[in-house]
Image (tube, rainbow, N blue to C red):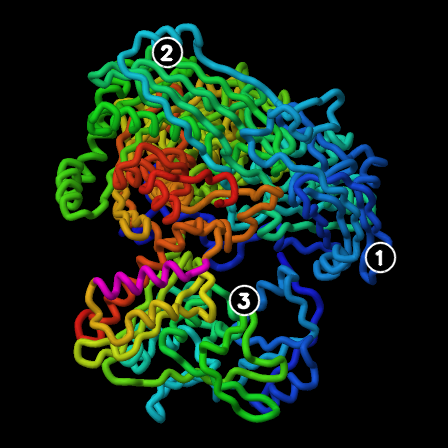
Amino acid sequence: MTVVGERPNPVGFGRMLRKEDVRFVRGKGQYVDDIQLPGMLHGAILRSPHAHARLVSVDTSAAEAHPGVRAVITGKTLEGLKLAWMPSLSHDVVAVLATDKVRFQGQEVAFVVADDHYTARDALELIQVEYEPLPPVIDARRALDPGAPVIRDDIAGKQDNHIFDWEAGDRARTDAVFAGAEVVVSQEMLYPRVHPAPMETCGAVAHLDKVSGKLTIWSTTQAPHAHRTLYALVAGLPEHKIRVVSPDIGGGFGNKVGIYPGYVLAIVGSIVTGRPVKWVEDRSENLMSTSFARDYHMRGEIAATREGKILALRVDVLADHGAFNNTAQPSKFPAGFFHIFTGSYDLQAAHCQVRGVYTNKAPGGVAYACSFRVTEAVYLIERMVDCLAAELHIDPAELRLRNLLRPEQFPYTCATGWEYDSGDYPRALRLAMEIAGYAELRREQAERRQRGELMGIGVSFFTETVGAGPKKHMDILGLGMADGCELRVHPTGKAVVRLSVQTQGQGHETTFAQIISEVTGIPPEDVEVVHGDTDNTPFGLGTYGSRSTPVSGAAAAVAAQRVRDKARIITSAMLECAPEDLEWEKGRWFVRGDPTRGKTIQEAAFAAHGSLELPEGVEGHLDASCVYDPPNLTYPFGAYICVVDVDRGTGKVTVRRFIAVDDCGPRINPMIVEGQVHGGLADGVGMALMEAMAFDEDGNHLGSSFMDYLLPTSMECPSWETGETVTPSPHHPLGCKGVGESATVGSPPAVVNAVLDAIGVRHADMPLTPAQVWRAMNGRPYRTDLAIP
Amino acid sequence: MRVPAAFEYERAESVPHALALLARHGSEARVVAGGHSLLPMMKLRLAQPACLIDINGLTGLSYIREEAGQLRLGAMTRHAELLASALAARHFPLLGDAERVIADPIVRNRGTIGGSLCQADPAEDLSAAFAAAKALAVIEGGGGIRTVPIAEFHRGPYETAVAPDELLTEVRLPIRPGAGSAYEKVERRVGDWAIAAVGAVVWLEGDVVQDVGIGLAAVGAPHFHAAEAEAALRGRAPDAAAIAAAAALAAEHARPTADQRGPVDYKRHLVGELTGRALRRAVARARGREG
């Protein structure tokens, strides 16, 4: 264990305790549900028990008569305000409150505003809703069957449940390589619908000040600036009269990217009642109605030579998007970044086609630390490589080493067009194998097999594509994905940096101070980090897709660089020498050849605010800002090895060891990186072994509480073994790559590969619960998206 | 945040006081002990009792002692106390086995054995353990005290022999010579309810199974009880063949249903697998081997 805090903080990068934890460990965090305003009312949402039903009538009279109820809002109310529907992030609309039909279990039907939370909840039971149940579409594979019920009859002329077809890569070239290949292996696989399940559920407090006309929304948002703009566009409110505050957030993982009906309802509630309205969902509401992740039904085909040279990959995906297409990703990419499915290998050709369909399930689809579907892509390729290894009787680590991109191939443009910026893949895999003692593990496995014991070793290698993204390629509803940053150094050399991104637990208040510190030499404890408040920070698209460090981190580094450059001019004025004669050491400019003659950044800051005469055209003070438009994404990568034991009699899996070697370039704060990796590995164990949201034939959600939607605990996690290599990004000012989602992306295939290696089965779908493992051992794995038959 | 519907609250000062409160409030009242089943159900509004009668003040019902050839457990004994009890472990190691895999430490610190039994969840572990141990339930009511064999205590899912105006006060486990016991459970994740679980107690006389108790949780066994398997093993030497035969009977007679924990065939397989494991470990313990 590393003891931190018993030594001085680093100036710049290095291990240091998180600045924000001082308030969290004292219980002084300020979350949305902690906000109390004078006269604040409380909202609660009535939700549909049906997956698909026509809304015949909604009688709110008894609820309205209930003591303490201030307003009951229905779809009809919102129709009058033209707010019954809102635009989705994917060229569709989403119902705020149902007007015609309900389309998934848990959909919002009515909103009660009352004096307190208990009263609001009590009043929900007094609303009489008459539903006319309709047959639901639950099995995505049957959504396009002729005669399937049409879910989206609100869309004029809609006759089926088809949303989009999308493809990437070169189909003809890929088909040609397949036609000539010695070996082709194909495999169907499901990445089940899972949920980010942040510790804090979603919620909002809305307050429309009738005097100033200003609307303030405290909400659980990963993207406050984007939300402000969308509220302005949707509700027609002037943008300068909207302030979105993202206070302390208890985990996002993509769950808090979008705008939920509850946020809009809190705003409407405040407009209707003239008082602040708080709405915070409960756990079941979060699991049933907010952004899920994955739900990709994939068929992969891999072509190779008999010697194990991988040639091409072909993928067909059926994507279950639920009742509304509300996936959140750069708008030109309906399947996110799935087309990085060629992974970490040097392929001649690749092609994928993705078909999106509506089902009677909650909307969403891009969440849970997935880097816009890189998770699904990595799972697919890493499972396919293992299937090929089994087919060719080649050790899976050896097969990967034969096919990994070589360091001299970077920058490398893959068969589907991504330009990988940097990497040394074989080095990372060899390091992971060395930490694991790979050869020894294989020997042990053979010995145990002799004794009838099931031990498995799983390997995965992933390449992430994070830091969306270059404005010319990437936008969300027309908003380019560049990030602003403002740095101001006070006269005494202390500083405040204002970010467009904000933390949901990642540690921005520490790492961004360290970025400023690395570049300027101002100690990190002297840098105040302001974030999460649209009135007090520059515009930017928010924290998700591991983009904070690649985009906003770069913006902060550039702003800091500008401050340092200006300090050089100020120092030259102070020392009456030319700026070119000055050299930098961390925290100080000095005269080349005479290190005793110099000025610290703090001294320069004071002079910048003083009477010092500055050169022509140089303004006073020591401030800088930057809007950073990344030239490319960053491509962190890693090699993971998982060791499991499987109880042959019960199918129970025990994760014995997990080795994770990550390369995210230079680590700003290694402790924080390791913590993020640990969390992501636990995510991977959860998805591989226990997490999934299945639905029964009526559309009932079978994972609507933590009794049924299982998250891993420390008892299911081994003591993680982490390692690192460092390959700086050539285009990021500090060489850093985003790492927040790496482990979540990379770990599930390692666990699954290990379990299947143990039981000697080609494939079975996650989650590999004891029942699924036992069924797989007996040749009869079941579908994990439906109720277990 | 989920919040319950409105309810009245009474705090009982003694067993007679609790019984008087139960008599006064009738079947609309519910007793709350640890509350780890009832309060979630109330928050989900699946349970909406008009009145809660809190018996957490009845500290006199919290004990583990040996008396009159029985291990006696007060109904308000917390799971954590049973887990920590050397006395219970000495006579019935299956209780420790079971407690280690019941929920999590937070629930075990507060949840009570009486509450678990009266909740009568079909997947409840102690019910299977007590069924294997052939325990007796002591029930007090206005009419006095009665003792009910555990095999008659459970009337079905969430139904017990305790009437609305009665209180479970004690569980008694007869201590007999030659005993060995074990509890085996498979769960999807720590803290989850069992996919299947099996408790076994054997009482050996020399090399022969003088008596045996086999309790099953989560697999639809009537009264948590594998009667056919017990009958097949009783009077026989507990060798591999006899245990395998008993395990097969337990599996055959179990009535599991499919849910997200697993399909029927797997659960039935588990009953056989775990019955075998529990019996082997119980026999080994009866012979003084393997803790």
Select label 2 or label 3 by which is in front. 3
Q: Who's the residue at 40% across and 34% down the image?
A: A745
Q: Pointer 3 indicates a residue of which chain?
A: B
Q: Which residue is mark 3?
A: B157
Residue at x-position 17% and y-position 37%: A438
Magenta span of residues: B241-255
Residue at which label 2 appears: A349
Compare marks 2 and 1 and give the one earlier in the sequence: 1
Residue at the image position 17 percent from the left and 76 percent from the top:
B207
Q: Which mark is residue A62?
A: 1
Disc 1 from disc 3: Cα separation: 35 Å
The amino acid type, in three-letter code, at marker 2 is Ala
Element on which disc 1 rests:
helix
Residue B243 magenta-highlighted: yes
Q: Is residue A136 left or right of residue B184?
A: right
Decide if residue A227 is on the left or right side of residue A24.
right
How many neighbours does mark 3 have within 10 angstroms: few (below 14), some (14-19), or many (20 or more)?
some
- Which is the main secondary structure of the residues drawn in magenta? helix
Q: Chain of mark 2?
A: A
Q: Is residue A631 depicted above or below A94 in this figure?
A: above
Three-letter residue code for mark 1: Ala
**Which quadrant of the view contains residue A307?**
top left
Residue at 73 percent of width and 28 percent of height: A153
